[in-house]
Amino acid sequence: MSETNDPRDERDERRADEPAPDSFEALRGALAAHALDALDAEERAAVERALAADPALRDEADGFAETSALLAAAVAPVEPPPALKSRLLAQLDALPQQRPEAAATTAAPPAPPAAAAPEPEAAAPRHAREPGRAERVAQHRWFQRPGAIIAAAAASVALIAGAIIGVGWAGPNGWGAQREMAAIAEASDVQSSTHEVDGGGAVTLYWSAEQGRSGVIVEGLPDVGAESTYELWYIDDDGPQSAGTFDVQGEETWRVLDGAFAPGVEVGVTVEPAGGSPQPTSDPIVVIPT
């Protein structure tokens, strides 16, 4: 009597290395972590097997890799200050730590009475620390939400770069102001003029008739306090028009003027009440012709 092989046995053997249906979404969710090189060796091997077996999954992984590369190139490399490492380590030390023994799941059945007594705690190897429940839950959530990894990576790039450089996007010394000032300074028709201010400091005006924009870089101006602010003005035959306010930020402050620049106007700076004024309430500390 001849033996017949059960087709189900062959199917089970053929799929031994394939991800189980309930783990497929977890593998799919791990693609973002794979692109960020955030998987351990075992997890990476599982993802690579799944990618080799599924071209559509491979295409999705390539998309995550491209996004990761864009994020990496979004900010120029900078040298972090020495104090940054100590601040991060201090914050990590402040986080509550969970003992691995406390991570046992409640679903596990109780040990039978005849079970051997557990080994003393001192005998447990300390170099093989197992992740606690909070860590495993956090890891699971990251894998199930690949979009969160990319969003968090982008946020981390922005936040860390902002902390290292010392400025944010907004504000007179922000990245936005610096980028706008750079665009004016690099214009083919850019002109500039620097004027000293009585009492200390200097104001340099850059303008481009081609772009219809202008900006100032102020150096060494005194802080006028919380109750006052500096205000910029375009001055023409119709009188002064407000072009925005700024507060001193350190030794050097950037400010792109609001409104359109027209050749021949003058640019003035006054000290006004906090928030600015629709019309000057004091004499200008400097007036720069163009």
Image: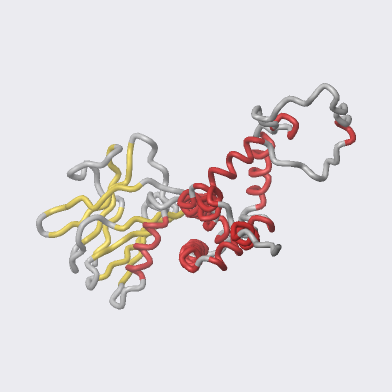
> In the figure, is residue 105 to the left or right of 247?
right
- How many numbered discs? 0
Q: Farthest residue in the left direction?
A: 238
62 over 81 or under it: above or below: below
133 over 169 or under it: above or below: above
Q: Residue at the location (55% across, 54% down)?
A: 27
Residue 282 appears in view: yes
Q: Farthest residue in the front direction?
A: 1
52 over 174 or under it: above or below: below
Closest to the observer: 18 or 42? 18
- Residue 26: % across, % down: 54, 50
- Residue 289: % across, % down: 24, 64
- Residue 86: % across, % down: 68, 45
Q: Quadrant of residue 100?
A: top right
Q: Quadrant of the C terminus?
A: bottom left
Q: Residue at the location (34% across, 34% down)?
A: 227
Q: Residue at the location (57% across, 68% down)?
A: 52
